[in-house]
Amino acid sequence: MTPSFEELDFRTTPLGDISLRRRSDPRLAGELLYEVKLGEEFLMSSLFTEAEVQLSLLGLASLDGTDWDIVVGGLGLGYTAAAVLDDPAVRTLTVIEVMEPVIDWHRQGLVPLGKKLSSDSRCRLVQDDFFELAAAPGGFDHTDPTRLAHALLLDIDHSPSHWLNPGNGAFYTASGIRKMADKLLPGGVFGMWSNDLPDDAFVRLLGTVFESCEPHIVTFPNPYTGGQSSNTVYLSHKNRE
């Protein structure tokens, strides 16, 4: 019989104590939930993943051709990355994750999608700071700094104004977004997840860098409230010229 609650891992990181938990809930017909906490703050849950998946689906649907090189910022429980790999047009996927334990959970098979990501030859899990790489010269691939991405999909902070690390704030400026956009191919796509409803000021900011930007509200059932919850996916398109 599976225990109702297990702490699968607990470690101290530069950003605080991070833990991976697995539990059952009688309200969910015995479905096992995987949750990640940073300190006392919940970062993610396997119960609410629709927007993470839509981040990939919406982003890739905007691309032309095949043989895409995709970069995902933030590994989490792997739902954004797994949805990228489901598309046969993807040539390479680079996932940038700052926390070593999160990568270890996938490589050790402690999370449901870990083996899928770790066993796919197109996928590389890289421990690094997405925001530092976004601001630095060159691309996101240390082995080929000149390689540009077809799409950059970001799921790290809670929203454009609610950051996990105060140092991330420099990214959410015209200068920060522009440096990141330089790592995209012409016609490339920048997609970003947010826990909050669309932020009009952030949409305007993205519009100063990209040819266009549209926020997509993604709704999904919430079994705890009996109603619907929603997240936002921002989708920005780089000029094709």
Image (cartoon, helix red, strand yellow):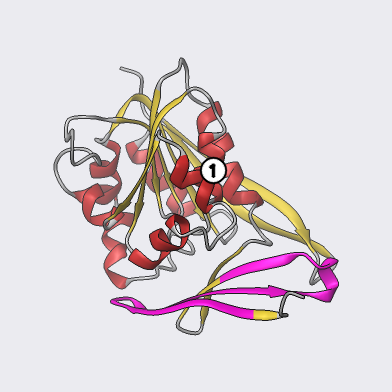
Could you say which is closer to the camera, residue 183 or residue 5? 5
56 vs 123, left or right, is right
Quadrant where the N terminus is found in the figure: bottom right
Quarter of the rendering containing residue 24: bottom right
* Residue at mark 1: 82
- Magenta residue check for 187: no
Vertical placement of residue 102 versus 120, above or below:
below
Chain part drawn in magenta? 6-35
Q: Position of residue 86 (x, y in %)?
A: 57, 33
169 vs 57, left or right, is left
Q: What residue lies at 26% left-to-right and 36% top-to-bottom?
A: 183
> What crowding class fits label 1: few (fewer than 14 Cα within 10 Å), some (14-19), or many (20 or more)?
many
Amino acid bearing label 1:
Ala
Q: What residue lies at 47% left-to-right and 17% top-to-bottom?
A: 64
Q: What residue lies at 39% left-to-right and 59% top-to-bottom?
A: 103
Vertical placement of residue 157 versus 16, above or below:
above
